[in-house]
Image (cartoon, rainbow, N blue to C red):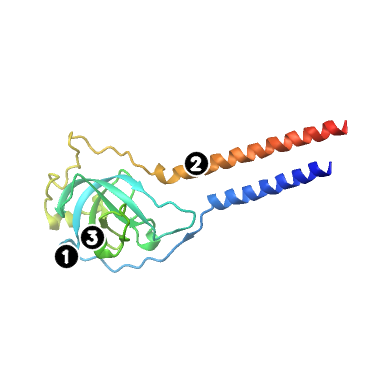
Amino acid sequence: MVVIRRIRGVLLMSLCALLVFMLMLTVRPQVTYACSCVVPAPPLEAMEDAAAVFEGTVISITKPFGIIQSSADPMQVTFQVGARWKGDLGDQVTVSTAQSGDSCGFEFAKGERYMVYARGAEADGSIAKGNEEQSEFTTSLCSRTALYTDAQEDLNELGPGNGGGSPTAPPENAEGVGPSVTGDNHSATAPWVLYVGLGAGIVILIALILIWQRRQSNKSRK
């Protein structure tokens, strides 16, 4: 009986430790900062300072993964490019920005269309050496980047763009169909599903062991 009680106590302590660990995984502390911006330069001046200027629709957003995160951690935003005003751009381009507006990141929404002013990531100091997944361009809340519907002043000053037809026409892919919005936001959350499933399996296993131990204890008493 004493041995069974000790085993049960160890199992209960293990279960409590597991539950605390799972709680730490699901509650992720984040370091936040305050964003302070000056008034953006006029469109022509902003284009002069930018490495790329284009309009496009967000087709995917990849956010950073980690237990402890900062609002300044970069997320990767991929666009289906429409009209281009500056930069050697393909049909799709990925731009990096801080994942939160608290750190001056532009909080893009998948499926929305934007007027984007992007700087070179190397010139902006946001590319880490050896990080091949880092995008070539970066933008922020402090740039002239805006929803396409709010960029009429920019369109008037910059005029028609190149490679995407009229700046008022929706961006199209090679088949002449609007870009499909099939992002990979789930890629950052998939590991959490694995952790939760693994934790649930361990909890169920411990519960079954405890039930078995209790039944064995009851049989010994009889």
> Where does the image place residue 196, in percent across and percent down from the top left?
54, 42
- Residue that badge 3 annotates: 120
Q: Position of residue 85 (x, y in %)?
A: 14, 54
- Tell me if I can see residue 153 in this picture: no
Amino acid type at circle 3 is Gly
Q: Is residue 203 left or right of residue 175?
A: right
> Residue 165, located in which quarter of the rendered image?
top left
Q: Nearer the viewer, residue 130 or 182?
A: 130
The residues bearing labels 2 and 3 have C-alpha atoms spaced at a distance of: 35 Å
Relative to 12, 82 lies left or right? left
Q: Which residue is mark 1?
A: 45
The earlier-in-sequence mark between 2 and 3 is 3
Instruction: Determine which quarter of the picture holds residue 171.
Output: top left
Q: CA distance from mark 1 to mark 2?
A: 46 Å
Q: Secondary structure at mark 2?
A: helix
Instruction: Identify which residue, 4 or 21, lies in the foreground.
Output: 4
Q: From the viewer's perspective, is the residue at label 1 or at label 2 nearer?
A: 2
Residue shown at 11% from the left, 54% from the top: 159
Residue 185 locus on image (x, y percent): 38, 44
Q: Secondary structure at mark 3?
A: strand
Residue at the extreme right of the image, as rendered: 222
Pointer 2 residue: 193
